[in-house]
Amino acid sequence: MIANRPWPALWAAVLALLLQVLAPASAGVVELAPDTGELALSPHVTFRHDISGAETVDEAWRLLGTDAFAPLPGGNPAFGFQDGAFWVHARVLNRNVEEPRWLMVQTYPLSDRLDVYLRYPDGRVKHQAGGDTLPFGERAIRYRHPNFLLDLPAGQPVDILFRVQSQSSMQVPLVLYTPAAFTELSRDAQFAIGLYYGILLALFFYNLVLWLVLRDASYFWYLFHISAFGLVLFCLNGLGFEYLWPDNTWLADKSVPLSISLALIGMHQFARVFLGLGERWPLGNRVSIVAIAAFVCFGIAAVFVPYRLITPAVSLAVLVSIVWITVASIDSVRKGYAPARLFLLSWAMFLAGTAIYTLVAFGVIPKNFFTEYGVQLGSALEMLFLSVALSYRYASLRNENERIVSEANVQLERKVAQRTRELRNILDQLEEAHSRLRESSRRDGLTGLHNRSHFHDAFERLLVASNQERRPLSLLMVDLDFFKSINDEYGHLVGDDVLRAASQRIGAVLEPHDALLARFGGEEFVAVLPGTDLRAAVAVAEDVRRAISSTPCESQHGPPVRISASVGVHTVVPGTVDDIEDALQVADQALYAAKANGRDCVRTSISAA
């Protein structure tokens, strides 16, 4: 009876065939619906890590359906820097009759060697190769990410076996696109990248003009930073291989560690100059210089050292640099450097994007839109804020320079005036210092009396006032007797002490009379007594003469010295003299008369006549 019933045997054969067909697909069949234009394969694939990298495709096919292939941990297609190779498998069933050809894109541009194997239900296997070890022109579509055109007949399950082997980070973010969906994606992606580099170019030329005008080193290193980091992203996004060296696979391999080294040199140097570490933190400045030297060595080593060794080292150094520059900027903020706050804000955006990208490269965090393009978003904002920070820093430095110049002026004025005090603001300090400087310029440096220049100005005003007020005005010309012999016998230091002592005695006598007293030159002094007639002036002159000769003058450089003085007196009658030189000449004649009459005496212009 069973032989007469063929249906169970037929169903058993069909079931066996289905099990044979479905057995390799441990993650299930991925269906491409008619309305599907884009599909990420990461949630649907299984993978195997071939540590030796020696497994053949036949061995990989045999291991499908066993525990050798497992789903991606957490759906994360980034494995970090690993040895060997990774096999990734997906079974796809195309339900879209109108789209038999699909484009599979690996949205990570830095893989060395990629192999794609398609196995159809009839047993046919097709193979395609890609990656940076092949010229860019061999790609299915000229696009910055590796891509492969897949024939996926409608209604037929197709096994996709993808192999990646690379010295770079092992990443398998595979996405299937219809031609129309990929065209829209590439258009939007190119627009976003063009917008990013447009911002960078605008900031570059804007700050280039500022650097040419201001010649501030920080602007130069900002330009270096923009250029180097722009080159890094050009390489990381696959644009360097697409536009700059499409046939040079060696440079495609070396460009990433080289550009990262250049970018980190510019990063450390810009931070060092901007934050002024040489002045604010010498130890931190030396650490930054060592970091710059290290990245110079990394850049040189990138030419000779294999990619799989140099790139992880450089990537780790990037993370260390992020931490170090953050520490340096926080230290500057803590020390009160205002521009460092804006620097830290802008740098945090860039550092966050860079850190995220590095963590993706090491497989620490999953790859998605924000982790893939976060570095572009962060760096664009960072460049904008840094441009503002540079302007703020320049203004701060200008204010700081003005403050330093003002403080230097205050120090000079303190030395000239011999005393000063702290004021609440710079303008008050300058005003007080200028006032002291003007007063000092009117004084004789040895005796502290007014000098001859000031005496002429003041005497002229007193003479005008005397004529206007019709009040007499008297002149006293005082000359120390035999002063030259004092210098010859005791030396000039003793002579200086004698002059100071004499000036103090003359000043003490004249102080109650509101007199104008000045050192006229050498050992000669002159005084003006406003409102004093000849008789009163002679009495004052006698007091001066006696004060000088009363006691010996003490000296710190020799024995006490006894001196005397000759005094000439002249009284200007209001309305008779308008020229101060005439009045001085008459008083001088009276002084010569006193000297001619034996010195140590007082003579008037009347007695001299």
Image (tube, rainbow, N blue to C red):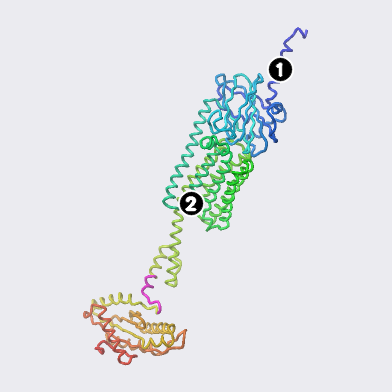
Query: Which residue, as the protein is rendered here, is positioned at the far bottom?
Result: 598
Discs 2/1, front: 2
Q: Which residue is mark 2?
A: 218
Where, quadrant-wise, is the N terminus in this rendering? top right
What amino acid is at disc 1? Leu
Residue visible at 61% across and 42% down in the picture: 311
Q: Secondary structure at mark 1?
A: helix
Q: Is residue 270 left or right of residue 158?
A: left
Residue 400 position in % (x across, y down):
46, 58
Measured as percent of width and height from the top left, residue 401 is found at 45, 59
Name which quarter of the figure residue 75 lies in: top right
Decide: is 604 above or below 208.
Answer: below
Q: Which sits earlier in the primary sequence, circle 2 or circle 1?
A: 1
Q: CA distance from mark 2 to mark 1?
A: 74 Å
**Mark 2 element type:** helix
Q: Which mark is residue 568?
A: none
Left or right of 268, for residue 549:
left
The x, y position of residue 299, in whole percent, is 58, 46
Residues in magenta? 437-446
Q: Position of residue 156 (x, y in %)?
A: 62, 19
Q: Residue at x 28, y 75 (%)?
A: 461
Of residues 247 and 273, the one nearer the viewer is 247
- The residue carrying mark 1 is 15
Which quadrant of the rendered structure holds the C terminus?
bottom left
Circle 1 residues within 10 Å: few <14, some 14–19, many ≥20? few
User: On screen, 463 above or below 90?
Assistant: below
